[in-house]
């Protein structure tokens, strides 16, 4: 009989860990509440509340260093002085360096709130905040450059999308695998049903032929979206933000392929999600 793998225990209250930042320096975090606390039971069972330190230094610190205690509060960019802490349930990463125990105060423990993340996510904000406090002009200049690059990337994607929509055909969509990114979510049942709806819509439009009227095509397209309304209601409303965007993007390709590309956001006319 195979033995069940034991769950890696989460650290206790006060456990402190150093971690390396992107620029080679260090920061640290510590546990404010463990999984036995009432707050954990109410907000995040089987999790510990971890707070990131405002400290950034050149070498691995000693737990006795009083500069480690202040909790990082984020003020860079659009942050509004929010404490960097959240509940984590995954094991402490192997690269995190145990420092010992830094007992939290009652006031620190009362900062608990229902926010969730991972240990690894704690490694980003200390450096971002430090640079905001000490190198703000450089950060703002980098932001301008990144914004321009993002605009250029957006334009490239928009141009590629426009080219695709102008050239896509129903025959090509008949061989297309709809929703390739749907793997872990939605469920297999929802994914299969969604792909069937899209494929049947393409087949129905092809069956209508090149002489089909606009009203005939619209009737098929309306049935497509109404079918999504039905399976969304039947399958616990699986269509969330990302799924909605995916469905509308795939649907728009069908709309263009059947010659109705002059309609904008046609799915919005009938969708209930």
Image: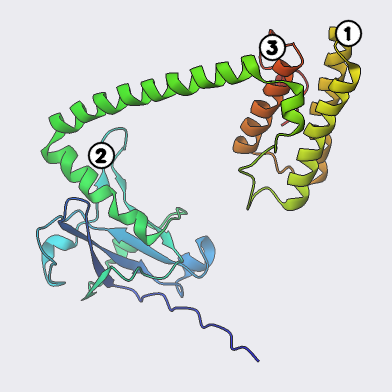
Q: Which residue is mark 2?
A: 75
- Could you say which disc has been placed on residue 77 in the image? none
- Residue 269 rendering spot, x and y as whole percentages: 75, 17
Residue positioned 45% across, 72% down in the render: 35
- Residue 161 rendering spot, x and y as whole percentages: 55, 21
Decide which of tag 2 and tag 1 comes sooner along the chain: 2
Label 2 neighbour load within 10 Å: few <14, some 14-19, many 20+:
some
Q: Is 193 on the left or on the right of 164, as rendered?
A: right
Element type where label 1 sits in the image? loop
Indicate which label's residue lies in the foreground, 3 or 2: 3
Residue positioned 88% across, 25% down in the render: 204
Q: Please tell me in which quadrant of the rendered image residue 250 appears.
A: top right
- Residue 225 rendering spot, x and y as whole percentages: 79, 27
Indicate which label's residue lies in the foreground, 2 or 1: 1
Q: Which residue is mark 1?
A: 211
Label 1 neighbour load within 10 Å: few <14, some 14-19, many 20+:
few
Q: Are marks 2 and 1 in contact (CB under 8 Å)?
A: no
Residue positioned 47% across, 66% down in the render: 40
Instruction: State the separation of the CA atoms marked 3 and 2.
Output: 45 Å
Label 3 neighbour load within 10 Å: few <14, some 14-19, many 20+:
some
Decide which of tag 3 and tag 2 comes sooner along the chain: 2
């Amino acid at each position: 009989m195979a033995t069940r793998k034991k769950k890696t225990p989460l650290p206790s209250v006060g456990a402190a860990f150093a971690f390396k930042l992107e620029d080679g320096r260090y920061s640290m975090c510590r546990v404010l509440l463990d999984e036995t606390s009432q707050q954990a039971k109410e907000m995040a069972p089987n999790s510990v509340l971890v707070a990131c330190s405002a400290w950034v230094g050149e070498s691995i610190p000693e737990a006795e260093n009083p500069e480690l205690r202040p909790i990082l509060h984020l003020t860079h960019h659009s942050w509004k002085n929010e404490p960097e802490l959240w509940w984590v349930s995954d094991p402490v990463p192997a690269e995190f360096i145990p420092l010992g125990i830094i007992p939290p105060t009652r006031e620190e423990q009362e900062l608990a709130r229902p926010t969730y993340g991972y240990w690894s996510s704690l490694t980003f904000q200390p450096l971002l905040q430090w640079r905001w406090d000490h190198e703000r002009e450089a950060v703002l200049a980098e932001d301008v450059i990144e914004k321009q690059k993002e605009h250029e990337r957006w334009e490239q994607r928009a141009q590629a999308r426009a080219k695709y929509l102008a050239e896509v055909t129903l025959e090509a969509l008949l061989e297309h695998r709809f929703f390739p990114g749907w793997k872990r979510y939605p469920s297999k049942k929802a994914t299969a049903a969604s792909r069937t709806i899209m494929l049947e819509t393409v087949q129905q439009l092809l069956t209508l032929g090149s002489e089909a009227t606009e009203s005939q095509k619209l009737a098929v397209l309306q049935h497509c979206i109404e079918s999504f309304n039905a399976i969304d209601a039947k399958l616990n409303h699986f269509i969330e933000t990302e799924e909605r965007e995916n469905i509308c993007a795939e649907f728009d390709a069908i709309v263009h392929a059947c010659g109705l590309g002059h309609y904008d956001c046609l799915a919005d006319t009938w969708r209930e999600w």
